[in-house]
Image (cartoon, rainbow, N blue to C red):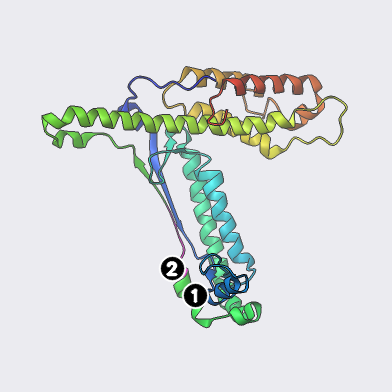
Amino acid sequence: MSMLTAPEAVSRVSIASSAMISELNVSLWTGRKKDKRASHKVTEDNNAEEGSAGVYKKLLGDCPELDAILKHVGHVRNHIHYAMTMPWGDLGQRLVTTAMSFDYTTKMSEAEDEFWALVTSFLKVYDWEVAQSQAKLGDMYNPADYLSSEQIKHKFNFRMVLAPVPENNWLCELGKDQLAEVETRYQEHYEAQIGNAMHDIADRTVVALTKLHDQLDWVAGEKNKRIFESVFDTCLDMIEMLDACNLTGDTQMIAIHSKLKAQFGNEFGMMGLSTEALKEDDVLREQTKTVLADVLKELPSLNM
């Protein structure tokens, strides 16, 4: 298996001009709390060691408005923030390329608007839900578990910040004896972050293409075979990411992107492949499966 190769010295200036660091911070009230008394009873009834089991109660029971917020936040994290960015550092920051930044910031802005709309809907029913909670929780109900609606409101927040990729201007403050060593270590760390980001895109592409390849793995005449639009669309997204997130100009990634683009069509499915075409055309389906198989042999992956 070939691996992505990074240039000997990744230019911080070029990366700083082609990407930004994104940080997403979302806080919310989950409506869950550990019930110490019930947890103790469970461990005692099962002759278990204290602390080995826990009972977490849903303070509002099944609350559709709260569930909608939790589901939305999960979608934003997984299908926008993580899907459109690459890892950067160990503090939860992500790297977004300038090529992706407009779509990313647009989707994040829409996601934030929806977040606050969902929070508003939840706050409208919060007091009513609290009033119903005693009947829902029975002996696990404790009025001290509940905050006022105004207090609950401040439990929610949505904040996305974009910042430039840091350069090493601070090195000028070091003495000459330290400068060479620190510069070398900083460069090694910087290149490692770029390498991690590039491999993340490659690994995610492997996952996406493998799912589509598996759905194409059937012969003419078989019935009830499905090619999911979501799987197909994820492949289109990752093909775009291969190009937009090629921070180092890796030649292998360029070649793979070109091969996939040629097979899927210049307009990424709009004037090229589609799930319907793949279902109906046996030759096209087999050809696409072969291209995917070839690409999967070339793409680096931690699991392959």
Q: Quadrant of residue 181?
A: top left
Question: Helix, strand, or loop for circle 1?
Answer: helix
Residue 286 placement (x, y as % from top left)? 75, 21
Quadrant location, the C terminus:
top right
For residue 193, above or below residue 133: above
Q: Which residue is mark 1?
A: 149
Image-based side of 40 in relation to 94, left or right: right
Q: Which residue is mark 2?
A: 154
Residue 209 placement (x, y as % from top left)? 63, 30
| Magenta span of residues | 153-159
Residue 30 placement (x, y as % from top left)? 53, 65
- Residue type at mark 2 is His
Q: Observer-nearest residue: 268 or 127? A: 127
Q: Earlier in the sequence, mark 2 or mark 1?
A: 1
Question: Helix, strand, or loop for circle 2?
Answer: loop
Q: Observer-nearest residue: 40 or 278? A: 40
Q: Is residue 190 visible?
A: yes
Image-based side of 284 in relation to 5, left or right: right
Residue 157 placement (x, y as % from top left)? 44, 60
Q: Are marks 2 and 1 in contact (CB under 8 Å)?
A: no
Q: Is residue 241 visible?
A: no
